[in-house]
């Protein structure tokens, strides 16, 4: 160590206090120049702390003096001779701790850097143990699956329809925003066109008036078609919320109609649908899951009815209030069930259908869903006289709908007001200007950041219609920035959404008391919101 060259001295000064271990071993050669050993000429404190428990003090010793010297020598020799580095992970103290060693040629020897990777290896061990456990569990599950293959095939058939509906719902949720945005300005423009042509038709006489009436009829039909598209997308998006567990006020009549719309391809060639709907309050339920239960009961009713005589078969929907609970019945005039079948109808895996014919959730799953909502589900049936499935749910303490506030005064309705529209879809701004522009001053921006800049300078608007999900700055972020500054215009915000909700968006809408309208919207809703706008406080 008395003859230390400058490069080694510099390395020692650099590595002496390094948190990583560092060792320098110099090759020991015989008279012919063959490497016969290695001598440790430098071991920093970190390396000594890591290696001392296993090897004692290394500095000044040769590799051949170590019990594991031959293996060290075998690793070091090719590094010096070929210049190829080596990285390896070494266990110590019977695997109690691990060190990663990176070895490179340094002068006529080897430079080794050591890092304690014990925590990493322990995490890997725990992960591997979990993987092994998971693999074991999977093998056991596969064994059980093989034993019950027949039962699982039945379950697969029963769940097929549910999976299809879930996929359709997820797809609808994903593209709903993209559909509803253009649908909003298509519907809005059709509505404006209908209004304007209706006025012209009343002002004109003769053939021109007749042609306008024909045009008006065509536009009305197009508007009804757009409304049907909106209804279909809205209904399908309901399925995408089936994984939600919240129980909220649900209109059972709306849930029935939603399910009936999806079940009609199964029903229309089998039976007539009748409704005996009483006046009932909202129930406390999960809308998507309740809709899936009703859909399953309707499909089951269709499958119980033979084909060929739709005029003489009925599927009847009944609702009534019994005390504090709402009763919903789905009755059919199908083949009915024997007492033996009826006693097992809610058992898991039980089915009376041929393989591939069971396309619903399965009545056992339906009953379980109703139980999670605090309800009950039962059945009455006789062979040859049809079946009645009954769902009983607790009524909700709050109503499902809120009555919109009336316009403040006649003067408010007629007064010219100042409206800001913020939406990155140009068509939305155009249709909003057509709906409101004849009476009110309408400013349209296509960027949340532009809206922030404007509102920081001038927030004197009667109403601000803002899209919830925009590219550069979302409506949520715009609201938050304005809230930080205490902007008074927040009380006049209305959020517009095409249905592309993220989890953050759902939480945001639940946390702020800001009105929300879904696209596509009715022009009268927009006009009413402007008329109902709270007063501006000018300075």
Image (tube, grey):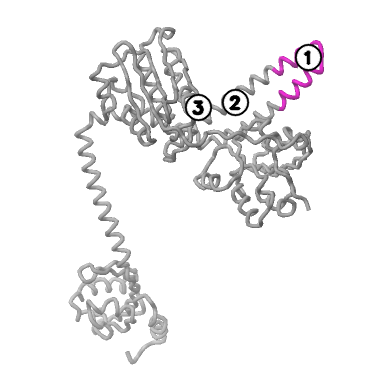
Q: Is residue 107 above or below residue 468?
A: below
Query: Which of the marked residues, 1 or 2, is nearer the chain's N terminus?
Result: 1
Could you say which is closer to the camera, residue 307 or residue 126? 307
Where does residue 48 sit, x and y in percent of width and height? Answer: 29, 80
Which residue lies under the disc numbered 2?
227
Q: Please report the bounds of the magenta region as a residue range.
A: 192-216
Where does residue 120 sit, x and y in percent of width and height? Answer: 32, 64
Which residue lies under the disc numbered 3?
254
Q: Main secondary structure of the magenta part?
A: helix
Q: Which mark is residue 39?
A: none
Q: Secondary structure at mark 3?
A: helix
Q: Quadrant of residue 434?
A: top right
Query: Which of the marked residues, 3 or 2, is nearer the chain's N terminus?
Result: 2
Magenta region includes residue 365: no
Q: Quadrant of residue 92?
A: bottom left
Could you say which is closer to the camera, residue 273 or residue 125? 273
Residue 487 horizontal side relative to residue 5, left or right:
right
Q: Which mark is residue 209?
A: 1
Tag 3–tag 2 contact (CB < 8 Å): no
Could you say which is closer to the camera, residue 359 or residue 347? 347
Tag in front: 3 or 1: 3
| Alpha carbon distance from label 3 to label 2 | 16 Å
Q: Secondary structure at mark 1?
A: helix
Q: Is residue 448 above or below residue 383?
A: below
Residue 209 horizontal side relative to residue 264, left or right:
right
Q: Secondary structure at mark 2?
A: helix
């Amino acid at each position: 160590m008395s003859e230390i060259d400058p490069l080694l001295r510099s390395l020692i000064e650099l590595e002496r206090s390094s948190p990583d271990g560092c060792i320098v071993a110099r090759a020991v050669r015989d008279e012919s120049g063959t490497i016969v050993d290695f001598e440790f000429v430098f071991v920093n404190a970190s390396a000594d702390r890591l290696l001392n428990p296993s090897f004692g003090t290394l500095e000044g010793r040769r590799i051949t003096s170590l019990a594991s010297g031959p293996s060290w020598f075998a690793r070091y020799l090719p590094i010096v001779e070929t210049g190829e580095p080596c990285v390896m992970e070494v266990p110590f103290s019977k695997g109690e701790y691990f060190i990663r060693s990176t070895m490179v040629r340094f002068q006529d020897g080897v430079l080794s850097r050591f890092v304690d990777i014990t925590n990493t290896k322990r995490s890997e061990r725990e992960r591997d143990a979990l993987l092994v456990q998971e693999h074991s569990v999977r093998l056991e599950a596969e064994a059980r699956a093989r034993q019950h293959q027949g039962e699982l095939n039945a379950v697969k058939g029963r769940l097929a329809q549910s999976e299809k509906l879930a996929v359709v719902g997820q797809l609808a949720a994903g593209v709903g925003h993209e559909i509803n945005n253009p649908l909003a300005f298509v519907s809005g423009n059709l509505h404006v066109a209908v209004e304007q042509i209706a006025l012209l038709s009343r002002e004109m006489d003769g053939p021109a008036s007749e042609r306008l009436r024909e045009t008006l009829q065509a536009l009305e039909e197009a508007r009804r078609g757009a409304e049907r598209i909106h209804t279909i997308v809205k209904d399908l998006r309901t399925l995408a919320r089936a994984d939600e567990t919240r129980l909220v006020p649900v209109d059972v009549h709306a849930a029935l109609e939603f399910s009936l719309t999806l079940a009609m391809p199964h029903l229309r060639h089998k039976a007539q649908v009748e409704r005996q709907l009483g006046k009932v309050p909202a129930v406390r339920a999960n809308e998507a899951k309740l809709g899936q239960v009703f859909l399953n009961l309707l499909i089951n009713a269709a499958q119980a009815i033979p084909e060929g005589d739709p005029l003489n078969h009925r599927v009847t929907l009944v609702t009534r209030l019994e005390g504090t609970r709402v009763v919903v019945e789905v009755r059919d005039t199908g083949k009915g069930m024997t007492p033996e079948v009826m006693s097992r109808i809610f058992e898991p895996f039980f089915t009376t259908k041929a393989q591939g014919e069971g396309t619903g959730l399965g009545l056992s799953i339906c009953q379980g869903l109703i139980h999670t909502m605090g309800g009950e589900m039962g059945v009455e049936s006789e062979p040859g006289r049809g079946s009645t499935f009954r769902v009983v749910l607790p009524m909700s303490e709050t109503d499902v709908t809120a009555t919109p506030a009336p316009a403040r005064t006649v003067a408010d309705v007629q007064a010219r007001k100042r409206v800001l529209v913020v939406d990155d879809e140009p068509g939305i701004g155009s249709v909003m200007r057509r709906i409101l522009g004849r009476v009110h001053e309408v400013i349209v921006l296509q960027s949340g950041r532009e809206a922030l800049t404007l509102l920081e300078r001038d927030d004197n608007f009667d109403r601000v219609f803002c899209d919830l999900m925009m590219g550069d700055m979302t409506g949520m972020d715009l609201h938050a920035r304005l809230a930080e500054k205490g902007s008074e215009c927040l009380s006049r915000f209305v959020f517009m959404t095409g249905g592309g909700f993220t989890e953050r968006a759902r939480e945001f809408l639940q946390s702020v008391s800001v009105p929300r309208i879904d696209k596509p919207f009715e022009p009268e809703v927009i006009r009413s919101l402007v008329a109902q706008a709270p007063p501006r406080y000018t300075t």
